């Protein structure tokens, strides 16, 4: 039972791994549209799609008799609130493996989407649909979240139904290692927003944002970039943060019960009458940790969550960028960002969704910082020197980002240019 702060700290300590056992986990979401009417697919189409994917060795995940996802070994496909689908990949050794996994998944997805007349969109925000046009599904927790999330953030439903992101999961080998990594990833959130911006079109118009997804996440209940995260936050401080954080829901048997504005400390103190004052298990703690929707968060590994979903051509760029810095060149990167002013980071964070690379941080624009961090990442991947069958190391996955920086043109800029010329919806779909 999780009855003390020490138990939460223990949970984080149990995630410590030897460097030789460090893994990389990549998760990415996609929007799905019917190609006949350009509308988001409904749950019955999802069921058809999952049915065909079973032919590739996937097995169904059921909730109260409804299929809500698929599993295949250590990877799974989950269903998001507006029928976006997310691949949560296996824990892999390097970016070559992570990229191969994404390509295998794309191959399977293409067979299915072609057969069923579905188009895929790889963007951080749905470029076509209005919120009230998006179908839902019978996944229980989403019904509760749809009701309660808007109370704490005005764009919470947009986050649930109209955003897609790429997430990277990385390990730590000590508490001190976690402190450095967490400091870096939170400090560079503004740069991450600018570099991976890919959500400029909203409801078929130029939104005047490069990453509208980031704007939405900044106005989402339980989201954002807490100033605390820019300090040298250790396991105890993170445990304090977790204990004071409101409970979103509690899973009791097969039912989801509203947290009703309890904080997790109330749960630990046996003060939740709706569940007969029972105490939280480790599973309850895991659920709570996964409903903290900040830009980055801690479980038994670190989750990096500030990237817009990227097209298949650049899907491996974000994981490579962070892996180079955090697994290959940690101390140099930590030294590089350690003198930045926290207030200036927060200001840049607020401005980056709209201004992108033109956002100022510490007297320089984000293009300057992105370029230097890319060099430090490349150095880290060179240090790792993990070679594929063609004799190339992981730096090859940074080529997309180098092009973005050289041309000062993000995926968001390209989409504005392409789509604004003729407003042809087919420009928005993956090829």
Image (cartoon, helix red, strand yellow):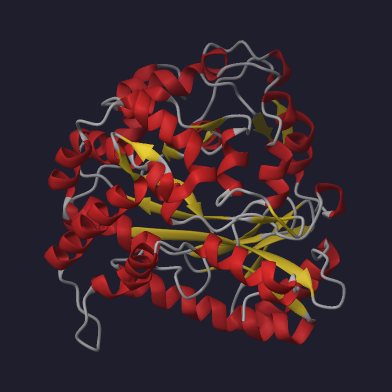
Q: Quadrant of the C terminus?
A: bottom right
User: Is 412 situated left or right of 81 in this image?
Assistant: left
The percent coordinates of residue 85 (x first, y second) are: 65, 62
Q: Residue at x 53, y 62 (%)?
A: 413
Would you place residue 373 above or below residue 236 in this image? below
Q: Residue at x 40, y 73 (%)?
A: 99
User: Is 382 situated left or right of 15 in this image?
Assistant: left
Would you place residue 392 above or below residue 3 in this image? below
Q: How many marks?
A: 0
Outermost residue on the bottom side: it is 390
Would you place residue 60 above or below residue 180 in this image? below
User: Is 169 situated left or right of 243 in this image?
Assistant: left
User: Is 257 situated left or right of 235 in this image?
Assistant: right
The percent coordinates of residue 205 (x first, y second) are: 73, 57
Q: Quadrant of residue 44?
A: bottom right
Would you place residue 262 above or below residue 176 in this image? above
Q: Between 281 and 102, which is closer to the camera in this rendering?
A: 102
Q: Residue at x 57, y 17 (%)?
A: 263
The percent coordinates of residue 358 (x first, y second) are: 42, 46
**Residue 313 visible to the viewer:** yes
The percent coordinates of residue 162 (x first, y second) are: 70, 51
Q: Residue at x 12, y 64 (%)?
A: 383
**Residue 9 visible to the viewer:** no
């Amino acid at each position: 039972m999780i009855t003390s702060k020490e138990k939460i700290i223990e949970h984080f300590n149990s995630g410590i791994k030897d460097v030789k056992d460090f893994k990389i986990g990549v998760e990415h979401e996609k929007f799905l549209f019917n190609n006949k009417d350009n509308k988001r697919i409904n749950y019955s189409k999802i069921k058809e799609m999952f049915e065909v994917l079973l032919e590739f060795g996937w097995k169904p995940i059921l909730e109260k008799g409804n299929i809500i996802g698929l599993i295949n070994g250590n990877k799974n496909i989950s269903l998001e609130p507006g029928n976006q689908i997310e691949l949560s990949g296996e824990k892999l050794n390097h970016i070559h493996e992570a990229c191969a996994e994404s390509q295998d998944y794309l191959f399977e997805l293409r067979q299915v989407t072609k057969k069923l007349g579905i188009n895929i969109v790889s963007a951080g925000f749905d470029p076509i649909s209005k919120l009230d046009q998006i179908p839902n599904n019978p996944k229980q927790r989403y019904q509760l979240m749809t009701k309660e999330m808007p109370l704490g953030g005005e764009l919470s439903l947009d986050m649930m139904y109209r955003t897609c992101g790429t997430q990277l999961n990385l390990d730590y080998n000590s508490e001190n290692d976690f402190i450095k990594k967490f400091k870096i990833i939170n400090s560079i959130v503004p740069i991450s927003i600018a570099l991976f911006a890919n959500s400029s079109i909203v409801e078929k118009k130029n939104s005047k944002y490069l990453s509208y997804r980031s704007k939405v996440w900044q106005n989402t209940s339980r989201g954002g970039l807490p100033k605390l995260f820019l300090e040298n936050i250790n396991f105890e401080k993170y445990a304090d943060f977790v204990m004071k954080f409101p409970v979103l829901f509690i899973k009791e048997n097969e039912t989801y019960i509203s947290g009703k504005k309890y904080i997790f400390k109330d749960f630990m103190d046996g003060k939740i009458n709706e569940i007969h004052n029972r105490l939280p298990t480790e599973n309850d703690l895991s659920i709570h940790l996964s409903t903290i929707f900040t830009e980055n968060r801690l479980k038994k590994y670190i989750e990096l969550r500030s990237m817009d979903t990227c097209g298949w051509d650049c899907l491996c760029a974000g994981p490579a960028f962070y892996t180079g810095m955090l697994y290959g060149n940690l101390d140099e990167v930590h030294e590089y960002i350690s003198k930045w002013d926290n207030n200036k980071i927060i200001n840049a964070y607020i401005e980056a969704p709209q201004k992108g690379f033109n956002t100022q941080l510490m007297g320089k624009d984000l293009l300057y910082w992105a370029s230097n961090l890319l060099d430090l990442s490349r150095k880290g991947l060179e240090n790792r020197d993990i070679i594929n069958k063609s004799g190339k190391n992981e730096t090859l996955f940074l080529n997309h980002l180098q092009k973005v920086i050289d041309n000062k043109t993000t995926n968001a800029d390209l989409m504005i240019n392409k789509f604004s010329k003729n407003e042809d919806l087919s420009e928005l779909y993956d090829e």
